[in-house]
Amino acid sequence: MAGPGLELDEAEMVLNAQHLAWGYGAQFPLYNWLQYGVFYIFGVCVGSIAGLKFALLFAGFAFGIAGLRRLTGSTNAAICGGVAPVFLPDVLWEAQRSLTHSVAVIAAVMIVIWALAGVLRRGAWRDYLWLGLALGAAGLSKANIFLLLLGLVGALMVARPSAAGFIPLRRLRCAAAIGVAAICVAPSYLWIMAHQDRALASGSKFYRGGTEGPFAPILALGEGVIGALLLLAIVVAILNWLPKPKPPAPRSAAIDWTARFLGLAGVVGLALLLFGAVVAGASRISPRWLLPLSVPIAMGAGVWLYAGAACVMVKRIGGAAAVVALTVTVGLYVTLVYLPARQNNDAPGFAQQVAAQAAGAALSGDPWLVGQVLLHRSDQQHTTECGRDILVLDRAPQAPYAADLISRCGAVMTTQKVLRLRNLRGKEARTVWASQITYPAS
């Protein structure tokens, strides 16, 4: 975030989070709504984009630790489990570097666990209503959150809460919670049903750049799991290998059940994802799509580590987290200050070039390019509709965005110029095709 430019997901926030709507295309709307509120208060700037990420991550970890404390009855066990997601690369690195909606998923996972803990520990009406609100917010975060929700249901069926002394679930109150969640998500889901072509646009990602053949879904899931959980597995193995205090710390039924339950939720979700991938023939599964499952797995692993070593494990996990966090902080600094990362593009200079070419026309085209301009030029307008003169920005020489507008709107291209987006740390400038589109055709 140190540079004057943006990553793709962040640039799309500049495009889509300056107005309120029930739907924004392929992504669910919760993050856009939150970003809209931050933009409204603090303005459209890099600080607003970074600030929302850090606020959501802080809230997520706070709720995660509070939820684990409810479940385990132990503050130290809650700290171990709550800190463990730090060892997931998409939490530690990508969430700060480029992710947007996935950050909302990270927070949503931990908030749902906190709300579910209240239901299992107290079981009052207000706890079920909080659970309904948490489920509603989660259902508006990102489509892959349903892997977690299904995983939690499956884990509750296998690891019965009553066996560990938790309050049994009550059907009527569960129905009320589901009703609250349904009310929260209904308007947005109705929009999705009415705009399926836009809402399902990202489905092609599952077939891009992956393996081929009948075992492609299994290999794709395996690659995704390795990318998501390898660092966590290494840290857990090392911490578990270190000498433990003797005699072993006493184990509580609540702590054991919590570790088993969260792990089961992740495993059940992975099984469901594998089934869906096989049916769909998916050839690519990104580690970030596994966040709703990798986060509870990490939390369960942290609680499991604590169960055998008591307070000494708090120090060990805290120390490991500090080392990893320091390494990532240095890595982010080096990447954003010294290397030709995308955030280090000369976005202000590029925005001036585009403004000089636009001459009153609205901008359209590649979201990353348009977002860079709108971040630095609030006087520019963005559109995806026909009916006015448009300057289309493309990164591909065949100008696919311009060709789409020409075919869709019956417009004509009057001029096309080549612009240069210079990287402040690199030697070569990125080529951009700026096509002037006139509508209607004259």
Image (tube, rainbow, N blue to C red):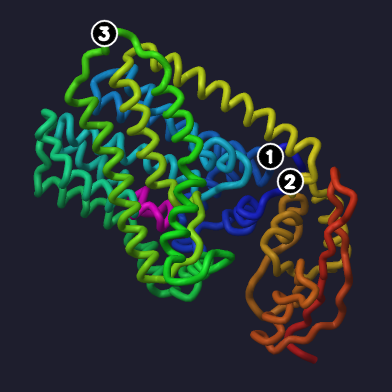
Give the side of residue 64 with respect to residue 155, left or right. right
The stretch in magenta equals 136-146
Q: Are marks 1 and 2 in contact (CB under 8 Å)?
A: yes
Other-residue count near label 3 (Cα within 10 Å), few / some / many at <14 / 14–19 / ≥20:
few
Q: Which residue occupies the foreground of this view, 126 or 285?
A: 285
Could you tell me the amino acid type at mark 1? Met
Q: x, y (%) of residue 215? A: 43, 66
Q: Which residue occupies the foreground of this view, 31 or 336?
A: 336
N-terminal label among 3 and 2: 3
Could you tell me the amino acid type at mark 3? Pro
Q: Quadrant of the N terminus?
A: top right
Picture quarter containing residue 126?
Answer: top left
Q: Helix, strand, or loop for circle 3?
A: loop
Nearest to the eye among marks 1 and 3: give it. Answer: 3
Question: Which residue does the numbered mark 1 point to in the structure image?
Answer: 1
N-terminal label among 1 and 3: 1
Spatial separation of the CA atoms under disc 1 and disc 3: 48 Å
Could you tell me the amino acid type at mark 2? Gln
Which residue is pictured at 54% across the width and 39% down the height? 89
Picture quarter containing residue 323?
Answer: top right
Q: Are marks 3 and 2 in contact (CB under 8 Å)?
A: no
Which residue is pictured at 72% across the width and 78% down the height? 388
Question: Which residue does the numbered mark 2 point to in the structure image?
Answer: 343
Question: Which residue does the numbered mark 3 point to in the structure image?
Answer: 247
Spatial separation of the CA atoms under disc 3 and disc 2: 52 Å
Q: x, y (%) of residue 300? A: 33, 33
Which residue is pictured at 39% across the width and 35% down the height? 298
N-terminal label among 1 and 2: 1
Q: Helix, strand, or loop for circle 1?
A: loop
Q: Could one spot residue 25 in this view of the protein?
A: no
Q: Which residue occupies the foreground of this view, 294 or 217?
A: 217
